[in-house]
């Protein structure tokens, strides 16, 4: 077996799997995946256009595009809820208006519309994961205790708990403690299949059983995206972007110059937009071919938002970039510190995101500042927007904020 870093390092039809060149049947058998090939394809599940009520980036394609409208005037803090640790998790809004999010105190919280606690669920480690809510009300979320959880609102016990990987150190800090952390997504895709990451990419059935596991050479820290044909796109800390078929077999990979820690966004035409720690935002075709790459001044760990004919992505250089579909730069906006928060685009093309300068920003479609609100700590959480214009966002000051603009100022 020849060592490799990507498929391009392997000869003939062999593929790179966990650092070694293998024939496709060897790679599938190695991790117990079903074997599929063009001559003997496995059936694809029917793709659901709205497979969940709420999840990170508002859908399996991760476009970050909201059907609602960001307030035209500066909102004020309506209420804040104090958790026991910083909140990097992006909130999900349930059918009853509750806001669901995780915290570094190891708890998943559900907070009512008036800011009071409805219930919480304790895990064994911190939570970076952004929860996903299925149409039946099941809430899926991950913890750095190496488990993916499925819980019913307010229930004493989870419906099921799935352990990701077999890392000997499940909690704490450091490479070995972090390799199997479930801080990626989860994403609900075709037929309710749940996709997440850890020491690879996992597809888990709604009953908590493993559908397939795809091994990567590094930790998968961001939510996998799902294309209309069921192909799963995920980045890894081995510097690679992977495309995985619905049967768990690799279609292709693309090597960047650094860790890939942000989630991909999938355009309507199948173009994949994803950033890397090599300071570039990439546009790839559905076949993995490079269409363009734009250099920024810092690591890109935020996920791109797509809308208004633009790709919006923040960078550690403190700039929000608006890039046209052809890869040319339209404009930039400078915040006061690094941008880890993924942007949201509203129904009229306005853009909203947080920054480590403790502020939440709203920009006009042309990049001009509409307003900003100062909160109590870094804003790494990606904001959620309710139908009435209420904004929910977490902060490193351990608070989940609800912001509202004056009712007399609709847009």
Image (spheres, rainbow, N blue to C red):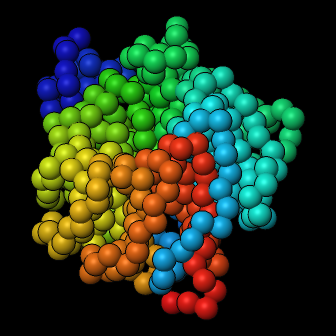
Q: Position of residue 187 (x, y in %)?
A: 54, 48
Describe residue 205's horizontal placement relative to residue 221 as left or right: right
Along the viewing direction, whichever of 403 and 272 lies nearer the viewer = 403
Describe residue 240's horizontal placement relative to residue 82 as left or right: left
Q: Position of residue 10 (x, y in %)?
A: 16, 25
Residue occupying the point 51% across, 26% down: 181
Q: Residue furthest top?
A: 168
Residue occupying the point 44% across, 21% down: 179
Screen quadrant of the N terminus: top left
Q: Quadrant of residue 294?
A: bottom left
Q: Position of residue 128 (x, y in %)?
A: 53, 38
Along the viewing direction, whichever of 16 and 117 lies nearer the viewer = 117
Q: Is residue 70 above or below residue 273?
A: below
Residue occupying the point 84% across, 32% down: 157
Residue 233 visible in the current orientation: no
Along the viewing direction, whichever of 284 and 177 lies nearer the viewer = 177
């Amino acid at each position: 077996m020849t060592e490799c870093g990507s498929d391009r390092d392997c000869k003939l039809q062999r593929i790179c799997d966990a650092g070694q060149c293998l024939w496709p049947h060897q790679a599938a058998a190695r991790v117990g995946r079903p074997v599929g090939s063009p001559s003997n394809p496995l059936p694809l599940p029917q793709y659901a256009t709205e497979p969940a009520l709420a999840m990170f980036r508002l859908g399996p394609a991760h476009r970050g595009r909201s059907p609602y409208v960001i307030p035209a005037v500066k909102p004020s803090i309506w209420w804040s809820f104090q958790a026991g640790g910083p909140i990097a998790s992006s909130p999900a809004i349930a059918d009853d208006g509750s806001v669901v999010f995780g915290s570094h105190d190891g708890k998943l919280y559900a907070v009512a519309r008036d800011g009071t606690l409805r219930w919480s669920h304790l895990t064994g480690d911190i939570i970076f994961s952004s929860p996903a809510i299925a149409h039946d009300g099941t809430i899926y979320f991950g913890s750095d205790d190496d488990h993916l959880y499925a819980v019913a609102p307010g229930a004493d016990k989870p419906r099921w708990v799935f352990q990701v990987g077999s890392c000997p150190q499940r909690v704490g800090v450091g490479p070995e403690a972090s390799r199997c952390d479930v801080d990626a997504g989860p994403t609900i895709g075709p037929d309710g299949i749940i996709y997440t990451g850890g020491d690879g990419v996992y597809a888990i059935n709604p009953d908590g059983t493993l559908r397939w596991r795809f091994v990567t050479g590094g930790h998968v820290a961001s939510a996998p995206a799902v294309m209309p044909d069921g192909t799963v796109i995920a980045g890894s800390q081995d510097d690679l972007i992977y495309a995985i078929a619905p049967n768990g077999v690799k279609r292709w990979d693309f090597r960047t110059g650094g860790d890939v820690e942000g989630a991909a966004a999938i355009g309507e035409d199948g173009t994949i937009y994803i950033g890397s720690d090599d300071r570039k935002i990439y546009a790839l075709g559905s076949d993995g071919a490079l269409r363009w790459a734009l250099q920024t001044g810092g690591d890109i760990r935020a996920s791109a938002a797509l809308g208004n004919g633009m790709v919006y992505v923040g960078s550690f250089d403190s700039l929000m970039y608006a890039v046209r579909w052809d890869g040319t730069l339209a404009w930039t906006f400078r915040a006061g510190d690094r941008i880890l928060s993924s942007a949201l685009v509203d129904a009229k093309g306005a853009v909203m995101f947080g920054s480590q300068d403790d502020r939440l920003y709203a920009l006009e479609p042309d990049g001009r500042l509409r307003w900003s609100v100062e909160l109590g700590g870094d804003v790494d959480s990606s904001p959620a927007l309710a139908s009435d214009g209420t904004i929910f966002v977490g902060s490193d000051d351990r608070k989940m904020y609800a912001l509202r603009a004056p009712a007399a100022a609709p847009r």
